[in-house]
Amino acid sequence: MESVSILIILAIFVVAVLYSSVGHGGASGYLAVMAFFAVAPEITRPTALVLNLFVASIATVQFWRAGFFSWRLFWPFAATSIPFAFVGGLIHIPTNLYKIVLGLVLLFAAFRLAWTFASDNDEAGRPRFLYALIVGAGIGLLSGLVGVGGGIFLTPVLLLMHWSETKTAAGISALFIFVNSVAGLTGRFYANPALLETLPSSVWFWIIAAVIGGMAGSLLGATKFNSLMLRRVLALVLLFAAVKLIFV
């Protein structure tokens, strides 16, 4: 196996550990890794979503088993995000300016989470139903356009708006990422039926690395890491994604 291929596998493993520890699938990280190693753009987005499916499903199970999930909070966001993620997967638009603006938003969220910490003892209030539907639709559309699962947007919203405590937000985001990744990948497949043929031959090695990393990271996130550590890890995740969006 070539040295570059080994480096990609190791990088995907690290990304999976880091992202899954906060309930994320890692698509933005996988996109950054593949861009860094000059993987063709038409390959990166569907590959990242495929890896997302495996890692997010593992994270969902781990956080669910640990008791960190809320159907009542999850479903209003997912109800609109799923169809809009499908629509986003159908759309192909120039994204240079969009990526820069989005990267700046993520930078703000990263520093907000890193330096201003709300106590998990604070009472979390449920969002208004209409707000959840609107936020879900916006995140779903962005996710489908960019090729991510949307947890990197939903988790900061849940925390900064005090709609959820940290670990429950991670558990909600994990399933949110899974369903949006399915919807986005379906949209891309509908637009391009030959999509799966574009996946690299080494994708199974990448999947194995992502699965092992996802198991390790989600176990740490659900059972070992405290909430303060999770928020700091999430801030690092957002910073990494912002740098990727702005500079890659």
Image (cartoon, rainbow, N blue to C red):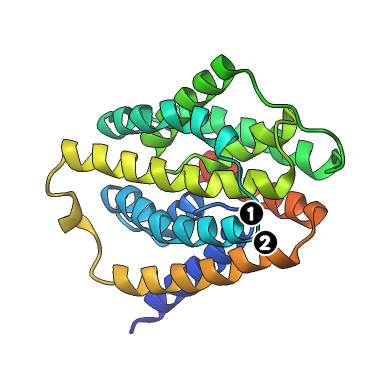
Q: Quadrant of residue 157?
A: top right
Q: CA distance from mark 1 to mark 2?
A: 6 Å
Considering every residue shown, the one lying at the far bottom of the view is 1
Tag 2: Cα neighbours inside 10 Å, few (<14), some, or many (≥20)?
many
Q: Quadrant of residue 156?
A: top right
Amino acid type of the residue tagged 1 in the rendering: Val
Residue at left offset 57%, top offset 18%: 129
Residue 18, position as x, y percentages in the image: 61, 61
Residue at left offset 63%, top offset 60%: 21
Residue at left offset 79%, top offset 57%: 229
Locate residue 136 relative to residue 107 in the image: left or right.
left
Amino acid type of the residue tagged 2 in the rendering: Gly
Q: The N terminus is located in which quarter?
A: bottom left
The relative height of residue 50 versus residue 247 in the rendered view (above or below) is below
The number of numbered discs placed on residues in the rendered structure image is 2
Considering every residue shown, the one lying at the far left of the view is 194
The residue identified by callout 2 is 221
The residue identified by callout 1 is 22
Residue 200, position as x, y percentages in the image: 25, 64
Mark 2 element type: helix
Q: Are marks 1 and 2 in contact (CB under 8 Å)?
A: yes
